[in-house]
């Protein structure tokens, strides 16, 4: 199973096993990673599962599609590496992925 | 179907509305409650903070498919809402949108008085709380010290345009609300800036073009970037820190900030109504779905009981059982006969199919 590391704003790391096919948001919620709220449950309509993808992984995770980019307007402190984790699907290629969780989702 | 769209009080303080049941919320479970209550001759008024029925279904995922509604292998949030609206039409519920129930108190005669944030009062024999994840409220940007400026310098909505005359306004965001208020406030503001993280907008092209024309005409400014800090004292904002997309920070004089970053769900005033709460949910029994207070029911995502599943279909079941007990309060002494819609001519008459 691919492993994903979530780093909280305070530096705390959470390494979780994610199933291929689930989203990076679902893997976080299932493992109770703090700071990922996912209020809408993965419908790309709340921007409360915002993460920063580590630079070395950005090519593999890809760029946000238009709907996600639009929804990122509703997130806080958006950067080039910003993604909504409900829109990143876990694949074998993402084994070792590292994402940072913002200080607050809102 | 009667509908009161405006956020202004229709009848003022004196225009109290008397009804059998007030339903707090207008999501799918609230809508189906109208059906179940209607079958047992109970009339309803529904109050919702959103400007439309459907709750999360309409606000968060109108186009997303739902796969676990019995009998509908796939249905979108909006279609489910539309179908429920069609299903309850025979019962003529009255909707009060853009309002939040702020106060709930029990009267001496056992009924309840509810007052909304626009001052509209209701008196009802039964209250059904079907408020889902709570009321949708504007997101508060996590900027250091923002709370201290709220109400004086930071606003999440505009009630009176005149209150913003001659102020140095910054609107943050790139959606329809941000752009709509940009247009509305430009004529009265001393200065107006729209701060957004990119030069694309999640708004109608018309609205965007209008904003760009105002910028060209010098009526307002568009600033590419994000607000990262607030400066001021005693609730009075003096300036904002704005970070551009290269990470450079600049300070911009501003005495009025309007952030528009969408909505989030907060339990809100329900917490102050004297009900027992457990982790922001309302415990109920599983026979009547009644709260710790007699004649106040809670159904759908906002309630909790052993084995609770936050599914729309669970909420439908809860609505049906709630209606049986509500009947006892609304029509005391009247015997309730269990009937099927398939075969009961009296139910079919109520539904307008006979």
Image (cartoon, coloured by chain):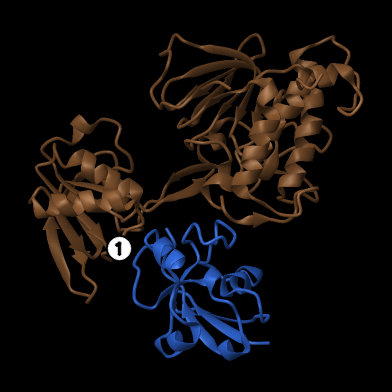
Chain colours: A blue, B brown
Please give the residue where the numbered disc 1 appears in the rendered image. B200
Q: Against B181, is B218 above or below? A: below
- Residue B93 x %, y %: 62, 22
Quadrant hosting residue A34: bottom right
Q: In the rendered view, does B323 fall on the left or right side of B124?
A: right
- Would you say residue B190 is visible in this rendering? yes
Q: Nearer the viewer, residue B207 or A42?
A: B207
Quadrant hosting residue B283: top right
- Would you say residue B238 is visible in this rendering? no
Q: Against B318, is B233 above or below? A: below
The chain holding disc 1 is B
Q: Against A93, is B193 above or below? A: above
Q: Quadrant of the C terminus of chain A?
A: bottom left
Q: In the rendered view, does B347 fall on the left or right side of A95?
A: right
Q: Nearer the viewer, residue B38 or B298?
A: B38
Q: In the rendered view, does B287 fall on the left or right side of A87?
A: right
Q: Nearer the viewer, residue B39 or A30?
A: B39
How dense is the environment of label 1, judged by Cα within 10 Å: few (below 14), some, or many (20 and up)? few
- Residue B107 x %, y %: 60, 13
Q: In the rendered view, does B110 fall on the left or right side of B72?
A: left
- Residue A23 x %, y %: 60, 73
Query: Image point 50% across, 57% down: which residue?
Result: A45
- Residue B342 x %, y %: 89, 29
Query: Image point 78% across, 12% down: which residue?
Result: B331
Q: Which residue is outermost to the front?
A: B354
Query: Image point 22% across, 33% down: which residue?
Result: B161
Q: Against B311, is B343 above or below? A: above
Q: Nearer the viewer, residue B266 or B278?
A: B266
Secondary structure of the residue carrying tag 1 is loop
User: How many numbered marks have been drawn onto this rendered protein structure?
Assistant: 1
Query: Image point 73% across, 22% down: which residue?
Result: B38
Q: Quadrant of the N terminus of chain A?
A: bottom right
């Amino acid at each position: 199973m691919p492993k994903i590391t979530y780093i909280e704003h305070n530096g705390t790391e959470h390494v979780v096993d994610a199933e291929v096919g689930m989203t990076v948001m679902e893997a976080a919620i299932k493992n109770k990673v703090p700071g990922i709220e996912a209020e809408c449950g993965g419908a790309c309509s709340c921007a409360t599962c915002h993460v920063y993808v580590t630079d070395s992984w950005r090519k593999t995770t890809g760029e946000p599609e238009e709907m996600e980019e639009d929804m990122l307007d509703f997130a806080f402190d958006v950067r080039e590496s910003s993604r909504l984790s409900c829109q990143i699907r876990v694949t074998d290629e993402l084994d070792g992925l590292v994402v940072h969780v913002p200080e607050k989702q809102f | 179907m009667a509908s009161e769209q405006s956020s202004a009080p229709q009848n003022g303080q004196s225009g109290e509305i008397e009804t059998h049941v007030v339903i707090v919320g207008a999501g799918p479970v609230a809508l189906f409650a109208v059906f179940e209550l209607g079958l047992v001759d109970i009339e309803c008024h529904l109050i919702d903070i959103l400007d439309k029925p459907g709750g999360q279904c309409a606000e968060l995922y109108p186009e997303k498919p739902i796969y676990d509604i019995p009998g509908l292998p796939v249905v979108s949030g909006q279609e489910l809402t539309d179908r429920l609206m069609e299903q309850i039409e025979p019962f003529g519920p009255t909707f009060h949108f853009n309002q939040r129930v702020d106060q709930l108190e029990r009267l001496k005669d056992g009924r309840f008085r509810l007052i909304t944030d626009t001052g509209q009062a209701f008196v009802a024999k039964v209250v059904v709380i079907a408020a889902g994840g709570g009321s949708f409220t504007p997101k508060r940007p996590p900027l250091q010290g923002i709370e201290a400026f709220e109400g004086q310098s930071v606003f999440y909505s505009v009630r009176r345009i005149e209150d913003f005359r001659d102020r140095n306004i910054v609107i943050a965001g790139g959606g329809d609300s941000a752009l709509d208020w940009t247009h509305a406030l430009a004529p009265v503001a001393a200065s107006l800036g729209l701060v957004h993280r990119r030069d694309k907008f999640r708004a109608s092209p018309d609205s965007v073009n209008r904003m760009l024309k105002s910028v060209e005409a010098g009526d307002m400014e568009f600033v590419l970037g994000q607000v990262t800090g607030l400066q001021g004292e005693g609730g009075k904002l003096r300036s904002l820190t704005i970070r551009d997309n290269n990470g450079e920070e600049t300070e911009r004089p501003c005495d009025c900030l309007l952030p528009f970053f969408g909505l989030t769900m907060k339990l809100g005033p329900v917490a102050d109504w004297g009900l027992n709460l457990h982790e922001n949910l309302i415990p109920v029994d599983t026979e009547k779905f009644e709260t710790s207070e007699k004649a106040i029911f809670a159904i759908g995502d906002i309630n909790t009981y052993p084995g609770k599943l936050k599914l729309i279909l669970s909420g439908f079941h809860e609505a049906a059982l709630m209606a049986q007990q509500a009947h006892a309060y609304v029509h005391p002494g009247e015997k309730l006969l269990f009937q099927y819609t398939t075969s009961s001519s009296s139910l079919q008459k109520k539904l307008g199919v006979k």
